[in-house]
Image (spheres, rainbow, N blue to C red):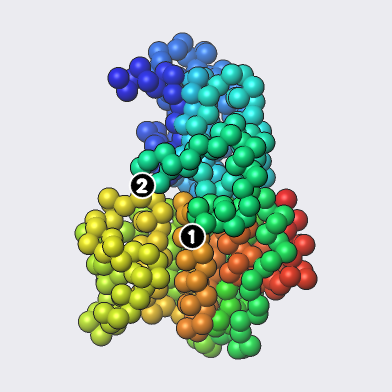
Amino acid sequence: MPEALARIVGSVFQNPRSQFFNLDTTGEIAFGCENLGLPASEIRERVWAAARELGIEALLDRDIFALSGGEKQKIAVASAYAPGPDIFVFDEPSSNLDHAACLELAALMKRLKAQGKTLLIAEHRLYYLTGLFDRAIYLKSGEIRRDWPQKEFLALSNKERADLGLRAVSLDSLASKTENTARTNSAPTFTISGLAAGYKRGKSVLEDISFSAAPGEIIGIVGKNGQGKSTLARVLCGLHKEWSGSVVLKGKPLKSKERAGLCYLVMQESGYQLFTDSVENELLLSKSRKERPSDEKVNAILQSLWLSALRERHPMSLSGGEKQRTAIGTAMAHNAAVLIFDEPTSGLDFGNMRRVVDVLKQSADDGKIVFVITHDFELLIRACTRVLMLDRGKITSDSSLHAENLSNVKEFFS
Ligand SMILES: Nc1ncnc2c1ncn2[C@@H]1O[C@H](COP(=O)(O)OP(=O)(O)OP(=O)(O)O)[C@@H](O)[C@H]1O
Ligand SMILES: [Mg+2]
């Protein structure tokens, strides 16, 4: 019985938005306790305890839909925690979380484990879980294929792990073998100057953002949760209007609305970006006959993203990662000069992460300017040629990414 189960099992779904029942954060965290019929005073106490435990007091009494991706994820964890279940089921809890938040989550999981709770965690990012899990179960085509004790799992070689399609268990081993080189010598054609934006008057989210970018560049945008990365993406693509500043593409200043077709965004919650009845139709959506990609191009995109077998499928019937790849394919089919990917690899295993890297590189080689907002260090060092760091709405560093100067970026992720 689902209600009875809810008392013992707390779940955190892959896409936090799909599990919210309330419009405000406090109500959402209280929701599970209310369903248990606890007295109001105890519910208040538990909501506070959950917020303290997760360090999210500042997010209480907020509109849920006005939170950043990582902030939503933390609310989802708090609402599973508050009723005090014995068993926790986490479905990719780290997607959307910055590095520090991942480590905080791991610390919370450790405390839960010490209290005797059972934790079941489905994940692609493994590095933050080492030292926590006792067993690793490997599923393939809906069947349990392997069941390793922790020690044996951690003893797998990098190759064995990669052959199984699994991510790295330590970020250290990655840093030394960055694969990218500078991919472009072209002059910048996209110039942002003095950009400022926000949601509430008087409280800016972005301040004085200035940088230029050239065709062929793949620029990573990194920063902690809630620093303004997705807001910047929305402003660049004309989905949210800036307060001041300018955006110039190929010498032409572009007003917010004029940027829509020229800058294309694959959103952080890309599932909400799919509108048609099949994967193939997504790639053809809203393009005039003239602009429609050729059959060969559509086939090539589907193939590069491992989507050929799914071309007839309804997007809503796809897994999180498949939806993600479909949204990425749609961006590839567009003729936009600037492509922005917001967290494109949350929900993707090792093999599909590699595919996304190839797709980003292909787009850059086709002369596009590519931005990737990411908390995924593996993606960053495999794909990006340059990294912008965003902190409290300002760019705090802008550096090219190659083996010699990786330490600066690595510091941010450790
Ligand atoms: N629609 C909105 N209305 C009001 N405030 C918002 C809205 N969307 C985001 N914010 C706030 O603006 C700030 C920046 O949010 P943004 O989504 O740009 O962060 P982010 O850097 O992408 O974070 P994350 O890594 O968690 O995705 C956050 O404090 C967030 O709470
Ligand atoms: Mg974001």
Judged left or right of residue 411, residue 122 is left
Does the Cβ of the disc 2 residue fall within 8 Å of ligand 1? no
Q: Amino acid at mark 1?
A: Gly
Judged left or right of residue 142, residue 54 is right
Kindly indicate the quadrant of the structure image that contains residue 109.
Answer: top right
Residue that protrudes farthest toward the top in the picture: 39
Q: Nearer the viewer, residue 267 or 239?
A: 267
Above or below residue 234? Residue 155 is above
Crowding at dot 2, Cα within 10 Å, few <14 / some 14-19 / many 20+, comes out as: few
Q: Amino acid at mark 2?
A: Ser
Kindly identify the residue that appears in the image at 67 percent across and 59 percent down: 174
Q: Which mark is residue 205?
A: none
Dot placed on the residue nearer the N-terminal end, 2 or 1: 2
Is residue 42 visible in the rendered structure shown here? yes
Where is residue 116? Give x, y as percent. 59, 19
Kindly identify the residue that appears in the image at 35 percent across and 17 percent down: 4
Q: Which mark is residue 141?
A: 2
Kindly identify the residue that appears in the image at 52 percent across and 75 percent down: 361
Kindly indicate the quadrant of the structure image that contains residue 100.
Answer: top right
Q: Secondary structure at mark 1?
A: helix
Kindly indicate the quadrant of the structure image that contains residue 216.
Answer: bottom right
Kindly identify the residue that appears in the image at 60 percent across and 67 percent down: 382
Where is residue 330? Give x, y as percent. 35, 68
Where is residue 291? Give x, y as percent. 29, 82
Crowding at dot 1, Cα within 10 Å, few <14 / some 14-19 / many 20+, comes out as: some
Judged left or right of residue 306, residue 149 is right
Q: Which mark is residue 351?
A: 1
